[in-house]
Image (tube, rainbow, N blue to C red):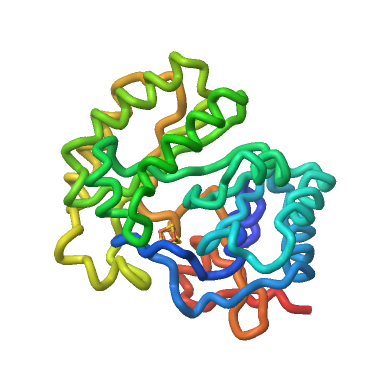
Amino acid sequence: MQEEIEIQHRRVGVIMLHGACSMSCLFCITENSLTEMTSEQVEEVLKIIEERDMESVVFGGGEPLQWTYSLVHSINLAKSLGLHTQVGTNGIGLTSNIIEKINADRYILPLDSVNPQVHNYLRGGFRKHYDIIRKRLKYLTERGISFTISTVICRVNIDILSEISAFLLHLWDKGARIHAWHLYRFLPLGRNGFKNANMLNISKNEYFDKTEEMKKRDLPFFVYRRPNMKLSKEVDFFWAEEGCIKIGSQVWFEKQSPDCLCK
Ligand code: SF4
């Protein structure tokens, strides 16, 4: 009974299309065991999301714009099912042409510092990533397209969050449709987070104190704490592993045995 209640209340379905990504962020928690979902598997997941009365779907990865199959097709299908569509991307492939083509309702982009050196250091694998993000945000602002910013808070950037909030406020004043600022806590998990734990770890108290400061600023967009998405009561994650579609949620992470949705 408890499980049924948990499932019914989730608002957002996150589809992890595959694990590949051209970047190598120091805090990446993606697991290398993630396999690529086919278009048909995504179709199946979207129907499950619709049946569960979820409101929104996030296409994520790895990097969703590197997915082999057609993201445009999956986004259109999600829209036809009445779902709000979001793409969580590292932004490298999110050119103006691609934005026009995929036409998602919202984009989720990373920003971990407004100091280019700090941001590029954390977001390894692409030398001028900071410049690319600034360019993408400028375009989305000019076009009036909604976006969310995600920041991973770790030892390197924990004391410079104020600068990001000031920058986002500046963008807001210029007309940016910022939906939310997600403040993720660094977790020592996955392909890079685990091995960089000593360098990046922060305590629970440090995380809550610093995020509290940001929340108290009364910013004109949502500021969400994300201490551990695996424990979120709002989100279900879907991914493929060994040919099966799996679903993970708080229930799953507590049980340590993901449900397989294959029929
Ligand atoms: S955290 Fe970085 S490396 Fe990992 S999937 Fe996201 S953009 Fe790619």
Residue 20: x and y in percent read: 51, 70
Task: Tell me: 103 left or right of 249.
Answer: right
Is residue 84 among what the camera can see? no
Q: Residue at x 46, y 76 (%)?
A: 256
Q: Residue 35: where, in percent of width, then height?
A: 58, 77
- The residue positioned 32% from the left and 59% from the top of the image is 124
> Looking at the image, which is closer to me, 40 or 127?
127
Q: Nearer the viewer, residue 85 or 127?
A: 127
In the rendered view of the protein, which quadrant contains the N terminus? bottom right
The image quarter containing residue 191 is bottom left
The quadrant where ligand 1 appears is bottom left
Q: Nearer the viewer, residue 249 or 188?
A: 188
How far across and how far down the image is residue 65, in percent? 60, 57
User: Which quarter of the figure has residue 106?
Assistant: top right
Spot the residue most to the bottom. 242
Q: Disc count in the image? A: 0
Report the front residue among 95 and 8: 95
x then y, percent, for residue 161 = 25, 35
22 in relation to 96, above or below: below
Q: Residue furthest top?
A: 173
Q: Work out which quarter of the rendered image holds the C terminus and state it.
A: bottom right
